[in-house]
Amino acid sequence: MKTARVVIFMFALAFVATWSLSAWAADAPAAAPGSSTPTAKAKITSEVKCVVTGKLTEKTVTNKQGKERKTLEIIVATAKTADGKAVDELSGKTLRVAPKKGLKVSDFVGKDVTISGTVLNNKRLQADSIK
């Protein structure tokens, strides 16, 4: 008699677990590849070759280890792609400037400059040349 109760209890437990998992799986929609939904953890990267004009500034920031370092930023006045199309979403934004090795960008701090390079995720500018 006790064995029958245990077997019935195990079947009931298995049924409830299966039912709960199927209901839980139906609630979470499957994220399409390349979509930026909160459930999707993939980081979407965008790289656009641009010519950016604006004012170059220098800023001191604190990194995660607590050390202060100087970074270069450009306040975008205008931005154009390599084929000459205007990129309006960058106007007025501040982009961090990461110069190519050997490029002296720090000499232009406080001046209006034209930088050609690659804009990454609308946050950072990988500078190839500066005028």
Image (cartoon, grey):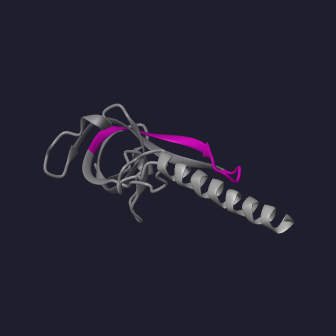
Residue at x-position 75% and y-position 59%: 9
Outermost residue, bottom side: 3
Q: Quadrant of the N terminus?
A: bottom right
Camera-side residue of 126 and 110: 126
Outermost residue, front side: 1
Camera-side residue of 110 and 73: 73
Rendered location of residue 73, percent (x, y): 44, 43
Camera-side residue of 83 and 17: 17
Up-down relation of residue 20 to residue 93 (above or below): below
Q: Which residues are magenta?
A: 52-67
**Image-quadrant location for residue 78:** top left
Residue at x-position 75% and y-position 66%: 7
Residue at x-position 38% and y-position 49%: 121
Rendered location of residue 88, percent (x, y): 25, 35
Rendered location of residue 92, percent (x, y): 35, 31
**Image-quadrant location for residue 117:** bottom left
Residue at x-position 20% and y-position 48%: 81
Q: Main secondary structure of the magenta part?
A: strand
Q: Is residue 93 left or right of residue 21?
A: left
Count up the numbered dots: 0
Q: Is residue 131 left or right of residue 22?
A: left
Rendered location of residue 98, percent (x, y): 43, 55
Outermost residue, right side: 2
Outermost residue, top side: 92
Does the magenta-highlighted stretch encompass residue 79? no
Does the magenta-highlighted stretch encompass residue 66? yes
Camera-side residue of 87 and 55: 87
